């Protein structure tokens, strides 16, 4: 993308539980009188805003003329380190409801100028949301929940989180109140409490992307890799098929995985070709639809 200098402001805002929602606000240093539209970036399960190439990706999107707000969900288990799962007690109870509430909190903070920069103006009535994996699932629900969101893009999104609970997980919850998963990258054994499952089942009509996508009348773009080993591309097809928006599109990326051939930590000098392609598609789509 074009050579535009991007600045970043970092901070935190309190969640509805008074826990910190850490954020980075990226914005282009350009002479522009008109307020900048905002893209809200949501990470996925066992993810965080500083994962892999996501920060550099947010910078690239900002170069296209947007303020990009990347947040850590308040219960994602990553504390002040920004990159380590050092709060597993919080991770264990990260519900989809709280993630959705965190999005609402971030939007309200933007509207109240609690998240801003002195030398820019933000168009807080024109917000786009971009989510990866579970964050894409939440992005769809948020788009149906909050009227400030005028467009949604998903990367590798889950369509129905309740379809992902395995029989073994459900048995653990019923017998022990907790199940354990292994973080393939760090080797950590990470607990997930029964409250996460119960919340998703009880509030399915509000939380499940495949249900909320039927309510959308805003532009929606679903990007997925055909080689996704974690979430099959049929999930994107399901979201696309159920989406009632007249302005919807699906983009299937060949020959890459769940994170479009990016990894953590990101130490390459250039983006992978699939991720670069995804960024270009995303930026062009938001430039067309987020006005």
Image: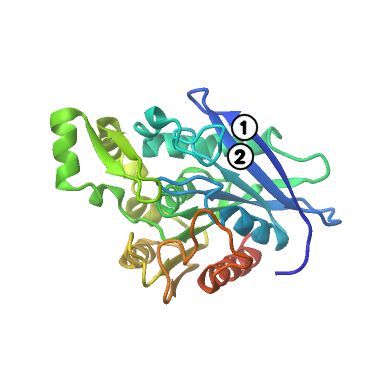
Q: How many marks?
A: 2
Query: The N terminus is located in which quarter?
Result: bottom right
Disc 2 marks which residue? 23
Residue 19 spot, x, y in % from top left:
51, 26
Residue 42 spot, x, y in % from top left:
51, 48
Is disc 1 placed on a helix, strand or loop?
strand
- Specify the color scheme: rainbow
The mark found on residue 12 in the picture is 1
Q: Which residue is farthest top?
A: 18
Residue 225 spot, x, y in % from top left:
41, 69
- Along the line of sight, the residue nearer the viewer: 240 or 181: 181
Above or below, 127 against 180 in this view is below
Query: Left of 89 or right of it: where is 110?
Result: right
- Along the line of sight, the residue nearer the viewer: 229 or 86: 86
Quadrant in the rendering for residue 179: top left
Q: Do we see residue 183 in this rendering?
A: yes
Above or below, 180 against 1 in this view is above
- Tag 2–tag 1 contact (CB < 8 Å): yes
The mark found on residue 157 in the picture is none
């Amino acid at each position: 993308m074009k050579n535009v200098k991007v600045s970043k402001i970092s901070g935190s805002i309190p969640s509805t539980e008074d826990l910190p929602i850490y954020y980075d606000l990226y914005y282009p240093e350009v002479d522009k009188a008109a307020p900048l539209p905002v893209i809200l970036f949501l990470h996925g399960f066992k993810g965080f805003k500083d994962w892999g190439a996501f920060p550099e990706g947010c910078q690239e999107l900002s170069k296209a003329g947007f303020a990009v707000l990347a947040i850590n969900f308040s219960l994602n288990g990553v504390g002040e380190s920004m990159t380590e799962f050092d709060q597993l007690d919080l991770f264990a109870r990260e519900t989809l409801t709280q993630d959705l509430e965190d999005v609402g909190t971030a939007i309200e903070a933007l509207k109240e100028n609690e998240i801003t920069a002195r030398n820019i103006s933000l168009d807080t009535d024109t917000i786009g949301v971009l989510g990866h994996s579970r964050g894409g699932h939440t992005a769809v629900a948020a788009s149906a929940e909050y009227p400030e969101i005028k467009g949604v893009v998903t990367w590798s999104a889950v369509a129905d989180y309740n379809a992902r609970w395995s029989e073994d997980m459900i048995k653990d919850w019923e017998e022990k109140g907790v199940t354990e998963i292994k973080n393939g990258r760090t080797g950590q054994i990470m607990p997930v409490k029964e409250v996460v499952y119960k919340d998703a089942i009880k509030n399915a009509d509000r939380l499940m992307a495949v249900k909320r996508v039927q309510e959308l009348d805003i532009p929606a773009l679903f990007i997925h890799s055909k080689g996704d080993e974690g979430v099959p591309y049929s999930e994107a097809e399901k979201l696309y098929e159920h989406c009632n928006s007249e302005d919807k599109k699906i983009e299937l990326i060949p020959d890459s995985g769940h994170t479009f051939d990016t990894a953590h930590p990101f130490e390459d000098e250039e983006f992978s070709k699939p991720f670069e392609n995804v960024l270009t598609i995303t930026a062009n789509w938001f430039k067309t639809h987020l006005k």
